[in-house]
Image (cartoon, rainbow, N blue to C red):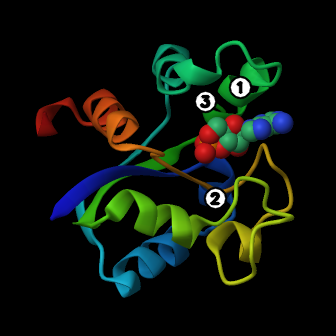
Amino acid sequence: MSERTLVLVKPDGVRRGLVGEVISRIERKGLTLVAMELRTLTRETAESHYEEHASKPFFGELVEFITGGPLVAMVVEGPRAIEAFRSLAGSTDPVSAAPGTIRGDFGLQIGENIVHGSDSTYSADREIKLFFPELG
Ligand code: CMP
């Protein structure tokens, strides 16, 4: 059974020229791109995307960072796509993320960890609707 997940190449990933690298890993894994767009988030969209982190001490910093430059948003599809992409991404903290993962290979800071992937079917539905309402 196929499912969909929302993937972001965050502004640090775009700035560092890692968009192609991330897309290449997604495609080599066998996942399929169904939508993709380069865009700069408004504060409103960023706050909505990260609503479950609203009470965290780093929320302000997170919103500043994610709105601070263009990012690439994509919808990725495949069998267990949510878990498959999270496995490609590696742990949230790039220092402890396994080498061979995107964060493990390219990151050093938890706040600038290159990619985001939805963490559940509920989040994937919500985030896909937020970024690509036309996919419904
Ligand atoms: P992401 O998967 O996009 O979801 C929430 C983000 O919050 C996470 O990736 C991290 O980039 C960020 N984050 C988590 N913990 C911290 C922290 N302690 N300081 C700054 N950012 C954080």
Specify the label residue 67 is tagged with: 3
Residue matched to label 1: 64
Lower sequence index among marks 1 and 2: 2
Q: In the picture shown, does residue 56 fall above or below 116?
A: above
Going by the numbered disc 3, the residue's amino acid type is Thr
Rendered residue at 61%/30% (across/down): 67
Q: Are marks 1 and 3 in contact (CB under 8 Å)?
A: yes
Q: Position of residue 111 (x, y in %)?
A: 78, 43
Rendered residue at 52%/46% (across/down): 71
Q: Secondary structure at mark 2?
A: helix
Residue matched to label 2: 13
Res 91 → quadrant: bottom right
Q: Secondary structure at mark 3?
A: loop
Q: Is residue 39 left or right of residue 125?
A: right
Q: In the picture shown, does residue 29 fall above or below 119?
A: below
Q: Quadrant of the N terminus?
A: bottom left
Res 93 → quadrant: bottom right
Rendered residue at 79%/61% (across/down): 94
Lower sequence index among marks 3 and 2: 2
Specify the label residue 40 is tagged with: none
Q: Are marks 3 and 2 in contact (CB under 8 Å)?
A: no
> Of 51 and 24, which appears nearest the observer?
51
Q: Position of residue 41 (x, y in %)?
A: 49, 29
Quadrant of ligand 1: it is top right
Q: In the picture shown, does residue 44 fall above or below 19?
A: above
Q: Assess mark 2: CB under 8 A from ligand 1?
A: no
Residue 94 in sight in this render: yes
Q: Position of residue 6 (x, y in %)?
A: 37, 48
Q: Position of residue 55 (x, y in %)?
A: 71, 12
Going by the numbered disc 2, the residue's amino acid type is Gly
Rendered residue at 45%/21% (across/down): 45
Going by the numbered disc 1, the residue's amino acid type is Glu
